Amino acid sequence: MDIANLESAPNIGLYETRLVADRDDRSADESWTVRVALRDRRGALAAIAGSFARAGVAVRSARIATGPGGIVIDVFRVQAAEWTDWDGVRRTIDASLAAGYDRLAVEAVDATIAIAHDPSGARSILDVRAADRVGLLARVAGAISRAGLEIHSATIATSGREAIDTFEVTGASGRGLTAADERALRSALAGRRVRRRPSLIRAASRARGQ
């Protein structure tokens, strides 16, 4: 199944995941391309990356974007054993989505971060650099979700032993990050629990179906 078929897959449930894993037979290092489709929701990337980590799957690069109809299409380049139970990975993602992002593990991330803002104020760009290791993406994505931020797109890459991750995000108001958003993010990345009141602006937007 190709990514187009994933994107057009009908009736993807709120906590349902479609996953296709293809082994790169030309590679000697157990490389796979994994395509994941699911409904956009906070904590989705953390759920996927956490499920990969529990299965011993190492993410080498990824492209994350939201497609038509609120369906997220994620393409991962990973290293995984030949006997990896991909259906088990998919079930773990489903269970994590059903549990909710507020159940994500609180873990510190030893990383350097930089934040830039779109001139329009609509979104912000978060760059995260850290020593590459299995589970890093899960920790970073989990911290972003626990801070109350939304990930709209992301590019994940590794250079040598360094992971270089770039996220396009919005804050509690549904726009670019405020000083309060940045404080919440830094607290979450430091491994501290973050308690934030729901944004009235975001609540109103969701009530309108936006």
Image (cartoon, helix red, strand yellow):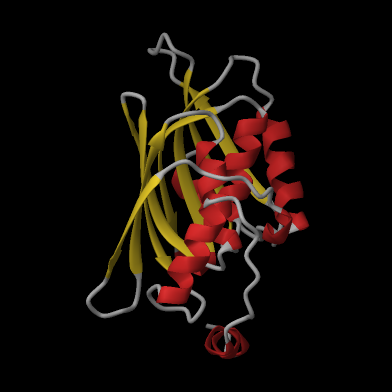
Residue drawn at x 47%, y 71% is: 181
Q: Which quarter of the figure has residue 55?
A: top right
Residue drawn at x 61%, y 24% is: 56
Image coords of residue 51 (percent x, y)? 65, 38
Q: Work out which residue is located at the far top of the displayed protein and give it.
A: 28
Question: Where 205 falls versus 33 (above or below)?
Answer: below
Residue drawn at x 60%, y 61% is: 146
Marks counted in the figure total: 0
Image coords of residue 149 (percent x, y)? 51, 67
Q: Which quarter of the figure has residue 177?
A: bottom left
Task: Please indicate whether residue 192 sits to the left or right of residue 189 in the image.
Answer: right
For this rendering, which residue is in front, 27 or 47? 47
Image coords of residue 48 (percent x, y)? 60, 44
Question: Where 177 falls versus 58 (above or below)?
Answer: below
Image coords of residue 208 (percent x, y)? 57, 90
Residue drawn at x 48%, y 81% is: 173
